[in-house]
Amino acid sequence: MPLSLLDPTSDEQYWPPRGVAGAPLGTILIAHLDLPSLRDFPDQLADRHFLPWCPTCLLLEQPRLRLDWTGRLLEGWRQVGVVGDSPTPSAIRAAIRSRTPPTPETLARYVIRRTGRAEPIAALIDCFTHPPAPPAVPRSTLARRLRDFGSYTPHDWRALHRLIVATGRTPSPMERVAHALGLDPRTLRGTARRFIGDLAPQATRWPGWEWKLEAALRQGGYALRSTPRATPPTARHRSAPHQLA
């Protein structure tokens, strides 16, 4: 099958998505792409509203595809990991962890895409930038824009960013991650509980920043766009910059 989902609590891979939500938080979306052309792939993969909280992994027999080219292929809406030989569940999860950390712009675009509101993007980018850069507009203006946007303050968005960065690269226990970064484990655990609720114990165990950001939006009571229901994958023919041999 061209698409499958990797369950976060087991090694089960399945399709189609289950239930009204489509896939629980922590699920990984897997795309099995054929070489050499990579021209035909499911429409859902390039749909910016299809299971956006699922980190995406491409399975390629010969993973010689540059990730920046992959980003253009997917129109910039998905940050992907790539697995070649032996696409085991552990290899797929490792590929998600090894992705380049998301940029402030990537995180802000996710929030805007899910809420359908573009006005706070500059304020969000400012909050997701570390170390903080001089804002293009006064901080009081940014704070007002975020206050009008929803329940989280600039301090909250910065704390969420620290959580995403701290828990993104290793499956180590939360306490070990906190100590390695010079953070108070109680503070990191409390931040995780606030933003991702009952899934806080999985913050370092389940790879991917997408599901954590999605969980935070839900915890914060933000109105989110509905996502399209899954249908049997259909292939879209796309021009590719080059062919893989």
Image (cartoon, helix red, strand yellow):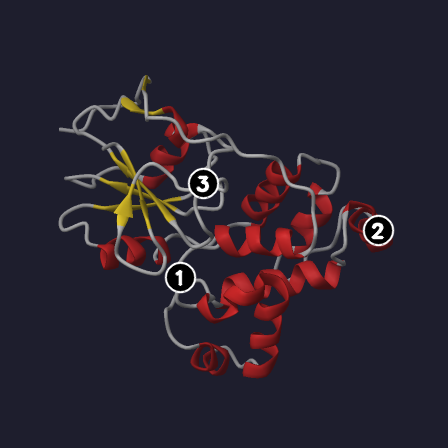
Q: Nearer the N terminus, badge 3 or badge 1?
A: 3
Q: Of callouts 2 and 3, which one flags the residue occurring earlier in the amino acid sequence? A: 3
Label 3 CA crowd tier, 10 Å (few <14, some 14–19, many 20+): some
Distance between mark 3 and mark 1 Cα atoms: 18 Å
**Which mark, residue 138?**
2
Residue that appears at 19% across and 49% down:
87
**Nearer the N terminus, badge 1 or badge 2?**
2
Q: Quadrant of the N terminus?
A: top left
- Report the residue marked by disc 3: 22
Find numbered disc 2 in the image and state the secondary structure of the residue it sits on. loop
- Above or below, 18 against 156 in this view is above
Q: Position of residue 137 (x, y in %)?
A: 81, 47
Instruction: Give the image location of residue 151, x and y in percent.
Output: 76, 55
Identify whether 80 is placed above or below 157.
Answer: above
Q: Secondary structure at mark 1?
A: loop
Foreground disc of the pair 2, 3 = 3
For numbered disc 3, what is the local secondary structure? Answer: loop
Residue 191, x across and y down, in percent: 61, 71
